[in-house]
């Protein structure tokens, strides 16, 4: 593939006795916004630091624009890192910080001034160019850190938890800004985050990682709609689950006999290839695909579980609650607040949860 | 519990103010009696005249300071400044890599190294300087070893030279350079060093553009801490420099105790003090870089 920006080949990294990165192979296309998503300790930061050159892989190789990075020190790599703490030089002004990388590459003065100016325009910090970083807000510091990387026009911009230090409102605003800027400059972005909404919103594609391994790679909608395993289903979005035994599997259709909730008849599901009748499986469905009906009713066309409302919270745009459907099973439900502010169902009320068979995803037990 | 804690914190009244200034009294008394008064006496003596047999005649005169313009004194001052400056420079060049190395070690190994640096202080400075005499003298350790190894045929003239004094000064004051440098380097966020590296900086640029500016207060503190005692050094030039290498400290001692010219010795002391004070001013000017703002109206 000519358009490959990063090619990671079977990367392995040990930290002491633990395998931080376990044979990770990933291909990232030029101009793509790619995220590494996972809980802390998943190995995503190790991966990023190996791309930047601060850590050396114990095995495997990284190719950037087709060139092997083995033995190439960080200051010779065509990548720039936006640090989580921003790591802005406190003794330099905004403009001096942004110019640093260009000066180190010994570009002509005029060229440096032109590119620093253009980049400061891009991140809308032209009026703060002579401030020192201590005098900037968190969001402004974030943008300086981004500008300091972008100005070098590297093959890859690496971002380490870029929005983690910002408060909620600023985070959403910067999210949109980051995406816009990435589209404008057209550079490959690789972003490490543990924040799943952020990863979904920003990325063209993302890899979900756990314990050093890549659990699934795909577009945000692939991961959300078609998780390949329970870890991804649970980490990306909220997962409502019932586990049980598959029966009557035929032509991709089948029935799940739940073992942890009692139902009058089985749950109809689409069955992925590889799962046979008699297999233990888990069905998961997203909260927004579940309809709540008051009382214990049944609907011929839909799957249906009966339960009791345990909590119901008003969060403005919608109601969020939990319904107990079995001794150890609780489902998260959402009810739109489109109609009025009144409580859709009372706490303690019996309800029926209904969903389309095609909205459920059946996965093997971990 | 305290019955009236808020009154101390909140009241801007003169009572709490006078209470805290009362705490200053012992220190103030000490400084006045043992520091300011003696300096005043030295200043007074420096403006008096030498008696025929060595006493002090209380006749005002600036002759002592005029005498200092004599090239001989100028040479000794110049030599002292040069030696102290060279010692400071050498300490900085040797101390920075050492301090950087220590500051980047894991915390437990840092403590070990800091103890190693401070161990020499457990032995008296005089004893340690004598040890250097044994090493450097004509039939000393260094010459013996070099001759045994057939690297030289005749012993080198090492002791009683400016070089020996310089060696002694660097040896004695290196820890005073390393400790403030270590403290300054240790405070630097490691991410800043990585950021510089990520932004294509080589070692030299990292050092010049990032490490030096960020450790400047530590560099200045270390330089002042080495320069001041080096400039006034007495023991080191006396034992390692002998008659061939005289510094201001030895000159002052000579004027007071040998030449019995107290007024001239006092004038020398005052001038030395002025030089020290000006280097301290530089130190204070470099210290507070907080809340620096540029380009703001």
Image (cartoon, coloured by chain):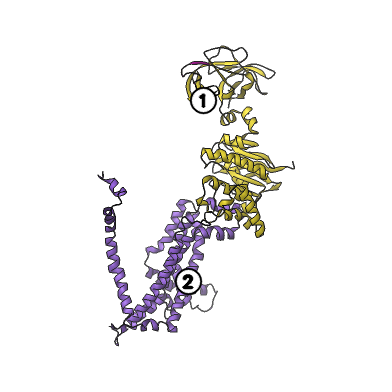
Is A49 magenta? The answer is no
Which residue ends up furthest to the right in the rendered image? A2
Q: Residue at x 44, y 64 (%)?
A: B283
The picture quadrant where one finds residue B1 is: top left
Pointer 2 residue: B85
Chain B pictured colour: purple
Q: Which chain is tinted yellow?
A: A
Give the alpha-carbon distance from disc 1 to disc 2, as whole Å.
73 Å
Residue A75 x, y percent position in the rendering: 62, 53
- Which stretch did the figure color magenta? A339-351
Q: Main secondary structure of the magenta part?
A: loop
Q: For the image shown, how many numbered marks are present on the structure?
A: 2
Which labelled disc corresponds to residue A320?
A: 1
Q: Nearer the viewer, residue B200 or A94?
A: A94
Residue A53 x, y percent position in the rendering: 61, 49
* Residue A245 visible in the snapshot: yes
Q: Is residue B23 left or right of residue B236?
A: left
Q: Is residue B265 above or below residue A57?
A: below
Q: Quadrant of the C terminus of chain A?
A: top right
């Amino acid at each position: 593939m000519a358009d490959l920006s990063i090619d990671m080949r079977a990367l392995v990294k040990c930290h002491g006795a633990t395998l931080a990165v376990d044979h990770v192979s990933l291909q990232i296309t030029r101009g793509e916004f790619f995220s590494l998503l996972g809980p802390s300790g998943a190995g995503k930061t190790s991966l990023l630091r190996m791309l930047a050159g601060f850590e050396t892989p114990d095995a495997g190789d990284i190719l950037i624009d087709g060139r092997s990075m083995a033995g190439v020190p960080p200051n010779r790599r065509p990548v720039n890192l936006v640090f989580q703490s921003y790591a802005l030089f406190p003794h330099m002004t905004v403009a001096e910080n942004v110019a640093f990388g260009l000066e180190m590459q010994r570009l002509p003065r005029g060229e440096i001034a032109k590119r620093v100016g253009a980049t400061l325009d891009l991140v809308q910090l032209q009026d703060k160019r002579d401030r020192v970083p201590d005098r900037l807000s968190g969001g402004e510091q974030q943008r300086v850190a981004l500008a300091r990387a972008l100005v070098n026009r590297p093959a890859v911009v690496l971002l380490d938890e870029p929005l983690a230090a910002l408060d909620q409102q600023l985070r959403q605003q910067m999210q949109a800004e980051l995406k816009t800027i990435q589209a404008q400059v057209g550079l490959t972005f690789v972003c490490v985050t543990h924040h799943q909404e952020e990863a979904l919103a920003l990325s063209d594609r993302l890899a979900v990682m756990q314990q050093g391994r890549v659990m699934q790679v795909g577009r945000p909608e692939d991961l959300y709609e078609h998780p390949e395993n329970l870890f991804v289903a649970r980490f990306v979005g909220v997962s409502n689950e019932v586990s049980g035994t598959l029966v009557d599997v035929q032509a991709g259709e089948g029935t799940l006999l739940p073992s942890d909730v009692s139902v009058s008849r089985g749950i109809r599901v689409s069955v992925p290839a590889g799962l046979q009748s008699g297999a233990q499986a888990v069905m998961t469905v997203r909260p927004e695909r579940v309809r709540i009906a008051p009382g214990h009713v049944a609907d011929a066309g839909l799957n249906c579980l009966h339960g009791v409302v345990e909590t119901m919270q008003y969060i403005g745009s919608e109601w969020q609650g939990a319904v107990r459907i079995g001794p150890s099973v609780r489902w998260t439900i959402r009810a739109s607040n489109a109609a009025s502010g009144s409580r859709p169902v009372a706490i303690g009320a019996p309800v029926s949860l209904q969903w389309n068979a095609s909205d459920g995803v059946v996965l093997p037990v971990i | 519990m305290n019955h009236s804690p808020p009154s101390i914190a909140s009241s801007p009244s003169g009572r709490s103010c006078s209470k805290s200034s009362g705490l200053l009294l012992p220190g103030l008394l000490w400084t006045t009696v043992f520091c300011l008064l003696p300096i005043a006496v030295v200043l007074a003596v420096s403006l008096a005249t030498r008696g025929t047999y060595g006493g002090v005649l209380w006749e005002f005169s600036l002759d002592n300071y005029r005498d200092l313009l004599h090239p001989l004194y100028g040479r000794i001052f110049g030599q002292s400044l040069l030696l102290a400056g060279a010692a400071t420079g050498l300490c900085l060049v040797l101390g920075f890599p050492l301090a950087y190395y220590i500051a980047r070690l894991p915390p437990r190994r840092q403590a070990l190294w800091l103890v190693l640096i401070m161990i020499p202080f457990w032995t008296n400075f005089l004893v340690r300087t004598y040890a250097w005499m044994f090493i450097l003298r004509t039939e000393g350790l260094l010459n013996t070893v070099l001759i045994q190894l057939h690297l030289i045929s005749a012993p080198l003239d090492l002791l009683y030279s400016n070089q020996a004094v310089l060696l002694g000064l660097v040896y004695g004051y290196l820890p005073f350079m390393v400790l403030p440098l270590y403290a300054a380097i240790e405070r630097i966020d490691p991410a800043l060093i990585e950021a510089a590296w990520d932004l294509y900086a080589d070692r030299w640029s990292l050092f010049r553009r990032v490490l030096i500016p960020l450790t400047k207060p530590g560099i200045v503190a270390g330089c002042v801490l080495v320069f001041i005692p080096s400039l006034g050094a007495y023991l080191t030039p006396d034992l390692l420099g002998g008659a061939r290498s005289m510094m201001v400290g030895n000159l002052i001692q000579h004027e007071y105790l040998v030449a019995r010219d107290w007024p001239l010795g006092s004038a020398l002391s005052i001038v030395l003090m002025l030089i020290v004070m000006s280097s301290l001013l530089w130190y204070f000017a470099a210290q507070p870089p907080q809340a620096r703002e540029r380009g703001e109206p």
